[in-house]
Amino acid sequence: MLDYGALAALAAVSREGSFERAALSLNVTPSAISQRIKLLEEKLGAVLVRRGQPAEATEYGRVLCRHFDAVMTLEGELTEIVPGLGGAALHPVTIPVAVNADSLDAWFLEAMAAFTRATGHLVEIKVDDQDHTAEWLRRGEVMAAITSEEKPVQGCKVRPLGALVYRATASPDFMQRHFPDGVTREALASAPALCFNRKDRLQDLWLEQSFGGNIARPVNWVPSPHGFVIACRLGIGWGCNPEALVADDLRTGALVELMKDSPLNIPLYWQASRLSSRLLEKLGSAVREAASRNLASS
């Protein structure tokens, strides 16, 4: 049988990144955390934590942490059903979720707020591109994800959420400097664009949709959704921003669309573990409700 006290220590170190912070989260001493993990490592004959700054779980350690998360999710659910069990209420369950940065800034926090307020449990967000969040599910590092991938990941169920609407925007000054004769392929080839990171294909997709193919162009890199909006506003480049984040700027004229009425719609899906869990269902319900208020029909 596994020692769940030791697993709690392992999960806390993995989550907090140090033995000291893990000890604080469990209200024990750092030496107690170290001893529990050492005994678990000796029992299993494997190193579970890489000691360093930060401390990190090894591959075997992450497997055990995922098992612990699943068990704690079920126990948290059981405590809601049978309040007399107690215990789990003292240590709220943390549900790890992979979310794309634009959804995080545009609407996902509404769902997180509703879930945490209603249940008292916690959410750990892992940020990645919507085309890559499903990989976190495949690696077993999260229990659910906002993803552009419609095909269910093995062991998961999928629900459509709607489409996140993007607008290709730039400042009026940028438009005058780079597109005095209109937005053409030639002008786009020399006008600086913005890109979130090397995984970001939104500008490529907009160009393919609007011009029938990609266009090589100079790029400024801005890895922040709100920074992206500010960079557009300051005339650093043009880029595709979530409609929700630029609605006021478009209304006031601080930003304009490169081409009128040419939105880029990215369908999003909620993929979650098939683990029979009322907590996951509650989180999924909060996500779908928030999505229904913020996403377009896909």
Image (cartoon, rainbow, N blue to C red):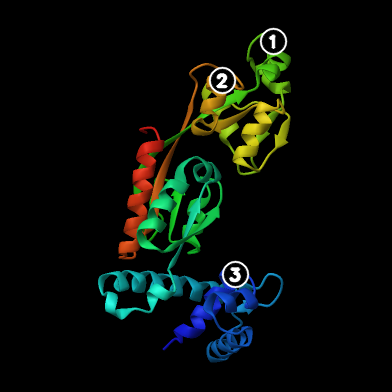
Q: CA distance from mark 2 to mark 1?
A: 21 Å
The amino acid marked with disc number 2 is Thr
Sequence-wise, the earlier of marks 2 and 3 is 3
For label 3, count other residues whose C-alpha is less than 10 Å away and answer few (under 14), some (14-19) or many (20+).
Answer: some
Q: Looking at this rendering, what residue extends furthest in the top direction?
A: 181
SS for dot 2: helix
Q: Earlier in the sequence, mark 1 or mark 3?
A: 3
Q: Earlier in the sequence, mark 2 or mark 1?
A: 1
Tell whether label 1 touches label 2 (CB within 8 Å): no
When asked about the image quadrant of residue 14, the answer is bottom right
Residue visible at 45% across and 49% down in the picture: 146
| Residue at the spot of label 1 | 180
Label 2, residues with CA under 10 Å away: few <14, some 14-19, many ≥20: few
- Image spot of residue 226 (x, y percent): 61, 38
Tell me the SS state at disc 1: loop
Is the Cβ of the residue at disc 2 closer than 8 Å to that at disc 3? no
Mark 1: amino acid: Pro
**Residue 147 appears in view:** no
Which residue has dot 3 on it?
16
Cβ–Cβ under 8 Å for marks 1 and 3: no
Closest to the camera, between mark 2 and mark 1, is 2
| Crowd band around label 1 with a 10 angstrom C-alpha radius: few (<14), some (14–19), many (20+) | few
**Picture layout, residue 13 above or below residue 229:** below
In the rendered image, which quarter is residue 78 located in?
bottom left
Of 56 and 135, the residue lying toward us: 56
Residue 43 seen in this snapshot: yes
- Residue 240 screen position, x and y as percent: 57, 30
Disc marking residue 252: 2
Q: Which of these two is toward me, 99 or 283?
A: 283
Between tags 2 and 3, which lies in front? 2
